[in-house]
Structures are given as structure tokens and as C-alpha cells.
Image (spheres, coloured by chain):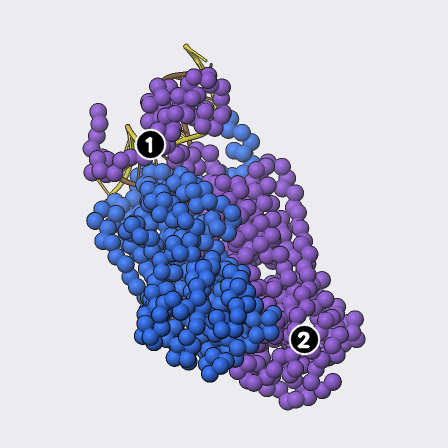
Chain colours: A blue, B purple, C yellow, D brown
Amino acid sequence: MTKYKGRLEMSEQRRPTMKDVARHANVSLSTVSYVLNDSGPVGHARRSRVLDAVRVLGYTPNESARRLRTKRAATVGLMLPDLRNQFFALIAEGVEAAAANQETLVVLCAPEAVGKTPEHYVRLLRSQSLDGLVYLPSGDGMTLNTALALAEAGPVVMVDELIRGFDVPSVVADSRGGARQIAEHVFSHGHRRVAIVEGPESLWTSEQRLSGYREAMARFGIAPSEALYFTGDHQEESGIRAAAELLKLPESERPTAFICVNDLMALGIYRYCRDAGLRIPADISVVGFDDISAASLVAPALSTVRQPAREMGYMAAEQLFHIIDQSDGPEEQRMVTLPTEVVLRESVAPPPGG
Amino acid sequence: MTKYKGRLEMSEQRRPTMKDVARHANVSLSTVSYVLNDSGPVGHARRSRVLDAVRVLGYTPNESARRLRTKRAATVGLMLPDLRNQFFALIAEGVEAAAANQETLVVLCAPEAVGKTPEHYVRLLRSQSLDGLVYLPSGDGMTLNTALALAEAGPVVMVDELIRGFDVPSVVADSRGGARQIAEHVFSHGHRRVAIVEGPESLWTSEQRLSGYREAMARFGIAPSEALYFTGDHQEESGIRAAAELLKLPESERPTAFICVNDLMALGIYRYCRDAGLRIPADISVVGFDDISAASLVAPALSTVRQPAREMGYMAAEQLFHIIDQSDGPEEQRMVTLPTEVVLRESVAPPPGG
DNA sequence: TTGTATGCGTTATCAA
DNA sequence: TTGATAACGCATACAA
């Protein structure tokens, strides 16, 4: 009757299953299942017998089996560029927090950070049949394609970024408004020749912030062509490069202020200036975007635009759970925009000449 | 014969299964399984027929089923305090990178950051039956118990921290050596009355660094009791509190230097000093530990001890995979210690008086 | 109210 | 070499 099952059977004690619980409680398998999910009626006496058995046996459901049966994984994915950028890390914390409230786990995918293509992860994620995904693309080009591939594996909601032609629910921040205001702050100090340090062009946030900056320029009567442009990749390093390239221009063409689409690049400018002996804001002004904690730690403190990173992650995850729960209805395609807040500190002053 | 399976059956096209592949390729189920895992011999013709079918159907294995059958999850867990601390974020990236190379996913658990107890996660993790876990405890007290609970769910390897009485493989950094050197740097400038800002006392790293500091003091002929001590929680905020508390001491008792067990708290000191109009390093010196990127961005740049965060995460994950792969052998309990490197910058100067 | 039986998609055992 | 077929642990339609 009993078969040989390898020595594991004898040494490591098997994890108890529902069957064990049923036997121990002297009820049938389905009764156990009923009380565990209250998916059916069951008498008081039997119910507590089951609960007891669960406790004494230390039973925990085998999620793999349940998953196979119900097609729900109790796990969602989170794909973002990296974690070293605190803005992303905070989004991750938000997602994590929302997931914890739903008794679900989140698997982390940072293709950029580990030198893998997003495709690597779409394959893995597809096999694992997760319940859904929160997606924050990096500006590496193939975003639409990977997004589409991702969507095949389950519902996805975007956070922070948007992808044209990929209409899924999303939660973003008011990039354009924040950008306009922080730029106005710069121009109101009298700057005219500014450098705009963009992010990857394919990114929605870059585009939004750029148009915010342009609105500000228009308002101050500055032609778009008067500004200098540099396309970075959101890393500190490209801020350094931007400064290096633009600051060695002849005095008359050199920008007096740097407007960066994120803090990391702004801090790159800081680093360059420090090494080059340039003073901020006396010699050049700089502003960023995100308000990561380093922004308020550097000297002079960086003026920037605060985004509610953690909350964005939290809400995005919540939207995802909402979709998952009622996967029948016609997936009301919502886009929620959270307000940004410009925080003025000490990194802007009038340009040197006047 | 065919049953009603809900409208899902008709609308959303079912994901192809091995059975579909078998039918399409005109072979049996087991043949498909054989070629997919090469777990059995199969003729050339049939093999390529199967492969073709896989391609045209776009088949991807159902990991839940495979998991149920094989008891392997192709997923590991990573539990750490939070992600906003870049040091932890980098460890996470390292784990993620190693996992990606093994075709496995990593689920993120940050109990501290989401206001849940570690128990919340041990329950979840246990159910999900992951293959293992990389664990970096926070100093919240119950670490041994949670560690033990965690270990019941599968192999665990510690990273960065160690837990007394919990003997599992681990990868840590040479905290004591680094601590000694950075402290010597401080004392060599003539400081005698220093403040030591510790982490939670239960933490191994705190203890190690503290004894490193003590070694340095001994070497400079300073009694342990000459130093001031403050116990923080690794967050920037507690650095602020440490400064607030210790700096309002009467001049003769006030510390002239702060030695912090991590950068975040050191930066908290920075923030306090700035707000209080104290100059670093002219008025007070400060050093940290970790070398997160903000450390080199603040002014003056913070002298600190670099830990190979990313590599630590990577190696920890690799050890975990090693254990998982040969779960028979007697789990050679290894502890690898990576070197630290003190990086001297500008945050230390002789004490005001001389 | 409770129990029996079937199937979820794979892997693995055993005959053929 | 190949193909039936029995688990894996759970949820549920259906019978009792």
C-alpha cells in the first residue's frame, strides 16, 4: 500500500496538507476547504474541530496547488528601471505596502539594474502567471513592445510614466504643472539662457516636463530656441556630462541655470560644479525634480518639485488589485494624476551678470 | 463531452498547455515533457515537431503546475528593513542580479517599510513555498524568533547582519576593521571627546562597529567611558536627534566629533548642523559608514567606510542558490566576509580648540 | 449540512 | 523510444 518515496519521506517531516487536517478533525476534505475559505456552510462543532486541527498540525495552505486550481497567484509583479534612485525605491515601497494589505507578495523586476532585457522578465512573469503587474518603464526604446508583451500575461497598470498607444490604468504626477512652476521660479530670477537637461526622449515624463518648461518660457517671453538642451538618462553621471559639455561653452553662450528633469542629474551638476570650483547658486543656478532626500541634504539645498512617490506606488497597486478583483467588468480605464509641489530652497539666484 | 466553463472559455483564448502542444505535434504528453526538460530520449523528427508546436502555439509552461509537481518555485524571497536606504536598495539589486542569472524571481519583503510584522511575511512566504530566502533583519528585537520561523520555510542565508544562535550561511562586510580605521582617522586629528551614534543594540553590525571604534580608542589611549553614546535606528531622523541631544551639552562635555554606524544618521547630523548654524568640519567633525551616494554629494563630502553592497547581495543570493541546488549535502555553513574600504573626504578636521 | 469525485497542468513511473 | 496513467494539493459541482 505505502510506497517508497525516497528518504525525504522519513527524515524531513512532510508539510501537512488538507487531507491531514481532514483526517485529524475527522471530517471530509471538502469540509476543511469550506471552513478555510468559508465557501460553504458548516456546523459549529465541525468547524472548530477543523480549526483546532489546523492549529495543532500547523497547517498552511499550499499556495502552488491553490494557484493551479484557482488561477490566482496572490502575487503581483513590479517592473522598474532600478532601485538606487530613491524615487523608484519609494515607489516600490508604496507598491509593497498596498500588496501587504491584500495579503499578496510582489516580485521585483529591475531589468535595467541587472543587465537583462525586459523580455527576460516577460518570459519569467508569464510562466509564473502572476495576477498583474505595476510597470514603470525605462527609456530604453522598446517600451511599447514590452508593454504589449507584459499585458498578455495579465493586467498591468502604469506608474509614473505613460506609454502612447498603451491604454491601461495609470497613476502619474502632474509633471507639467510642476515643471512649469519650477521653471518660472528660475526665470523670475532673471535667467534667460538656461540649459534643459532632459531624460530619454521616449519617456512621457520627459515630454511633459519639457512642455511645462516651455510654458514657463512662453510666459516670460523666451523663445524655445534660446534654451540649450541636453538629453540624459536620469543617472547622476549624465548630469555631470551635461555640465561638462555646456559649461565649457564661451561665456556668452554658456547657460546660467540648469533645469533638470530629475534630481539625480541635478546632483550630477552639483558634483561637476564642485569639482570645477563653480559656486551654486552664485555662479550657476540649478533645479531638479522628484525631491529625493539627498536634495535637501546637499549644500545649497536643491530647489525641486516633490512627487508623492510612495503614494503613487501605493495607488497604482491599489488600482491593480481593483482590476484583479473584478476582472469581468469592462476595465474602466482610469488615469489618476497626483499633484506635485514645488519646493523652493537655495539653489537658485540671479545670474552672475545681473 | 465538453462542459460549460464560463464565458472565459469563449472570449479570452485559453493559454496553451502541454496537452495542446502534444495534440498539435501529434505525440503523447510525455514526449512533450521529455523534450521540454530533456528528461528522456526522443527521436529527431518528433522532437522538432514538438518544438515547432511550442513555437506556433506560443506555449510557455505553467509554473504553478510545475511547482506543485516538483516542489521547486523558481522564486526566492528577500527580506530587508526598507528600500529608501540606498545601501539596502543596492543589496536588493545584487540579489536581483544573481537571481536573474538563475532564471528565478525574487519577492520583496520589507516589513519595516510597510508597517507589517515579519510574521506577516513568514506566513505568506511559507504558503508560497519559496525555494529560499535572503535575510537582512532590522533591529526590532524579535529577530531570532522570526529567523527561526523563516528557516522552517526553507533555506535562508543572511546578508550584512548576523544573528547569534542562528547558524546559517552568510555574507557580511568587515565592519570591525572599517570601523576601527575610520575612528582612527578621527582620533588622529586630535579628537578625544567623540559621540558614537550606534544602531539598534541587538544588531551584529552595531556591535562589531562599536568594538572597532573601541579598538581605535584603545590605540589612542582613550577610555571607553570618555565617549558619548547614542542609540539610533539607522534612519536620518535619529541622527538629527543625536545631534540635538548631544550638542546642547555644556561646552566642556560636548563632543567634537560624531562617529556614526551608518551614513543616513551621519547625514542627519549634517542636517541638524546646518539648521543650527554649525559648520562641518570646522565646528564639528562627522564620519559615517556605508558610502551611499549622498555621502559624496553633501558638502563637505562625508568621510565614511565603503561596503560592497551590491556584491554582498549578489554573493548572498549565489550562496542561496548553491544550497538549493544541492539540498542533500550537509549544508556547509559558510560565512564570507567582504573587505570594507575607508574613504577619506572632507568631513573631519581637528577639534575647534586645537 | 456533509461527503465524493473530478480536474487544474506537470512530472515521473511503468508497460509496451 | 514512446505512451498511458498516477500523483502533486486544492476547490468545487454534484450527489447524498
- Nearest to the observer: residue B75 or residue B280: B280
* Chain on which label 1 sits: B
* A11 or B350: nearer the viewer: B350
- Image location of residue B217, percent across then percent down: 75, 73
Residue A267: % across, % down: 51, 68
Which mark is on residue B348? 2
Q: Position of residue B128 (x, y in %)?
A: 43, 45
Marking on residue B16: 1
Residue type at tag 2 = Val
Instruction: Determine whether A84 is above or below B106 in the image.
Output: below
Residue A351: where, in percent of width, then height? 47, 79
Report the residue at 59% width, 84% height from top.
B278
Residue A215 falls in image quadrant: bottom left
Residue occupying the point 49% across, 25% down: B38
User: Is C12 on the left or on the right of A342, as rendered?
Assistant: right
Does A135 sit above or below residue B29? Answer: below
